[in-house]
Image (cartoon, rainbow, N blue to C red):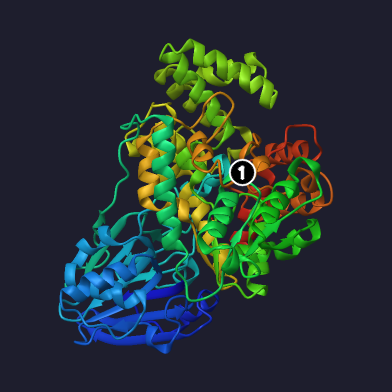
């Protein structure tokens, strides 16, 4: 895991790569050359995971001197690809996956991308053709941002490397800031919240030719990977569970390849527990015991206390357990540093807790951490998806199954049948859902508090969730399969991966996410809604697949917490003044964004407990802190 830089035309120095020294504490490299369009700069900060010797230092050049690589990520099947390339006559000088990637590109060009199993963002300079080629992995696990204007083109791992380049305005991208404030969403488009700075999206690549004119047209981005259409498979539950387990085990086998110590995040939920228990089985008790560390964030508040589930996993596997906790004072003291590393506003204090988990892992000497991101989205792990699932049963005339779900959820989750039917009602008809989505967005986005002059152009536009569904070709579809596709491709996973990458890399940790092995995700998407939400159970296919692996307490738990902090207690208690003062500061700094009186009324009702808990005050606070930190105008 590393930090990268590549540019053509801009006059830069190695400060561009040193800004992300935290991503690569094990070394750095910088290469400069020139072409007809001016300066070419390729930089790298190294976190050594595979072949930790100096042979793996980047930028990496092939023996001919034609190609130069800067690469962030891991190619998990590098051993298999090396063997294939050797059979084609390629000689290797290192044991690194970086050299395998470079030689794969030389051998197959852009067609190497579908052969790669892993997470990656890389740029290659072709000295003979005078062009840059950049690509990002299938799900965007590793970031790749870019600026393209009349002055040049630059690629980087983090926005802070780019935001003060010539031609970049240092202004907010109001459309994306509006999406964040109104819906709590980010990373759902190629745009960032910084005007003029974009990201290569998941599964995309681009070629920049030095002979082409910069700035007149945007770069020609190409999509090299698409998820399959949801709902094309209809296996039995037994076969689905067997297939899913086989795919997961192979993904884990590859994700455990490392030349440095590794551990895992452990929340006590189904996904992280599955990873720890599978690792215990695959490494063998002797290699696992005393070597593998699971790191958890724990809190005393009963409604989010998961320690009994964590204890069950630790007792079964014998993993070493490290536990961290945070209070309101800790959140306030670390939020500025977290924001600097995240680059953009983030939606809750849970991201601070995530950063604390990775810091604890680094303190324990770990350099690789496994985590469970992606399973909830591909396998329908969120309880709010029961509404669409019930609607799907009703639309299909499966009344007995619908009755079982109503009864089971009432028994397991305490949700009255009438409330469940109300949750399903907007999803019964696609047209009704579309109309409801627009009303929902306008009720939220058109509320008085968002009606500042800067945001008025966005108030009557379709909301971000409707827009992304349209882009994916699932607009109006409310079946569970379509929602899993949308969550995985656009509205949840990209945002979670942004936070995961920055929270881990700020402490020099490589985070691996085996549930996002593309073979595993593709199978889950092809299942559509089958074997996911049944009666009161979520992620049924995963539960059946891991039934003999997980502690009974974890396997049978029916609640869903996510990665939770006692946010409500903090906001309505020790952090109240901090949050309200932050909101006021945001209003003072950016008076055209929000309606002041309506915003303060909304925030006061939320912080005083007179209205339901809301993340809105935190979002408003974050926008002000972010704008001040990066010196941005609205």
- Compared across the picture, whether 418 is left or right of 38 comes to right
Quarter of image, res 383: top right
Along the line of sight, the residue nearer the viewer: 276 or 472: 276
- Is residue 410 placed above or below 225 in the rendered structure? above
Q: Disc count in the image?
A: 1
Specify the farthest residue to the right.
Answer: 574
| Residue that badge 1 annotates | 594
**Regarding mark 1 in the picture, which secondary structure is present there?**
loop
Q: Residue at image x 34%, y 65%?
A: 77
- Is residue 116 placed above or below 561 in the rendered structure? below
Q: Position of residue 154 (x, y in %)?
A: 35, 71
- Is residue 545 placed above or below 476 in the rendered structure? below
Along the line of sight, the residue nearer the viewer: 141 or 39: 141
Q: Residue at image x 58%, y 44%?
A: 181
Q: Position of residue 536 (x, y in %)?
A: 59, 26
Residue 595 visible? The answer is yes
Q: Residue at image x 26%, y 77%?
A: 125
Quarter of image, res 29: bottom left
Q: Residue at image x 50%, y 57%?
A: 498
- Compared across the picture, whether 592 is left or right of 519 comes to right
- Compared across the picture, whether 281 is left or right of 92 comes to right
């Amino acid at each position: 895991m590393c930090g990268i830089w590549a540019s053509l035309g801009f006059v830069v120095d190695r400060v561009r790569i040193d800004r992300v020294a935290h991503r690569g504490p094990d070394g750095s490299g910088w290469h400069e050359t020139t072409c007809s369009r001016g300066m070419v700069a390729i930089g790298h900060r190294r976190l050594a995971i595979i072949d930790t010797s100096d042979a793996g230092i980047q930028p990496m050049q092939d023996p001919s001197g034609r190609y130069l690589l800067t690469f962030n990520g891991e190619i998990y099947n590098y051993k298999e690809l090396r063997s294939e390339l050797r059979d084609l006559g390629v000689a290797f000088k290192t044991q690194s996956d970086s050299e395998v990637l470079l030689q794969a590109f030389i051998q197959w060009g852009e067609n190497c991308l579908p052969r790669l199993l892993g997470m990656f963002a890389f740029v290659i300079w072709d000295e003979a053709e005078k062009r840059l080629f950049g690509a990002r992995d299938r799900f965007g696990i590793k970031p790749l941002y870019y600026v393209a204007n009349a002055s040049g083109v630059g690629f980087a791992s983090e926005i802070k490397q780019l935001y003060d380049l010539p031609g970049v305005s240092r202004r907010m991208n109001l459309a994306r800031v509006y999406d964040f404030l109104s819906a709590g969403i980010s990373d759902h488009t190629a745009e960032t919240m910084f005007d003029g700075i974009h990201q290569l999206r998941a599964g995309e690549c681009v070629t920049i030719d030095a002979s082409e004119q910069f700035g007149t047209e945007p770069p020609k981005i190409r999509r090299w990977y698409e998820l399959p259409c949801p709902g094309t498979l209809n296996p039995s539950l037994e076969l689905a569970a067997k297939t899913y387990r086989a795919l997961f085990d192979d993904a884990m086998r590859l994700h455990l390849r490392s030349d440095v110590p590794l551990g895992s995040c452990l929340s006590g939920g189904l996904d992280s527990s599955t990873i720890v228990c599978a690792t215990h089985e695959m490494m063998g008790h002797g290699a696992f015991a005393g070597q593998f560390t699971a790191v958890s964030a724990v809190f005393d508040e009963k409604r989010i206390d998961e320690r009994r589930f964590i204890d069950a996993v630790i007792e079964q596997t014998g993993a070493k357990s490290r536990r961290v906790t945070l209070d309101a004072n800790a959140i306030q003291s670390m939020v500025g540093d977290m924001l600097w590393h995240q680059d953009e506003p983030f939606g809750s204090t849970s991201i601070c807790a995530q950063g604390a988990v990775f810091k604890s892992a680094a303190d324990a000497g770990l350099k690789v951490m496994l985590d469970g991101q992606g399973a909830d989205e591909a396998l329908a792990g969120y309880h709010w998806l029961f509404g669409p699932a019930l609607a799907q049963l009703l639309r299909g005339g499966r009344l007995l199954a619908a009755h079982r779900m109503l009864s089971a959820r009432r028994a397991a989750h305490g949700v009255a049948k009438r409330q469940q039917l109300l949750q399903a009602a907007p999803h019964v008809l696609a047209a009704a859902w579309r109309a409801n989505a627009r009303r929902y967005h306008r009720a939220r986005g058109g509320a008085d508090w968002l009606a500042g002059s800067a945001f008025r152009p966005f108030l009557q536009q379709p909301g971000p969730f409707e827009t992304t569904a349209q882009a994916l070709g699932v607009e109006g579809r409310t079946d569970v399969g379509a929602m899993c596709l949308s969550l995985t491709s656009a509205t949840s996973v990209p945002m979670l991966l942004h936070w995961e990458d920055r929270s881990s890399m700020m402490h020099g940790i490589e985070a691996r996410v085996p549930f996002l092995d593309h073979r595993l995700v593709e199978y889950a998407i092809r299942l559509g809604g089958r074997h996911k939400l049944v009666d009161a159970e979520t992620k049924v296919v995963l539960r059946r697949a891991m039934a003999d692996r997980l502690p009974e307490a974890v396997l049978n738990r029916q609640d869903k917490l996510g990665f939770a902090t006692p946010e409500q207690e903090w906001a309505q208690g020790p952090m109240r003044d901090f949050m309200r003062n932050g909101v006021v500061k945001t209003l003072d700094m950016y008076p055209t964004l929000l309606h002041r009186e309506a915003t303060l009324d909304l925030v006061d009702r939320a912080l005083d407990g007179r209205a339901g808990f809301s993340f809105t005050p935190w979002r408003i606070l974050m926008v002000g802190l972010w704008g001040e930190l990066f010196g941005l105008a609205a």
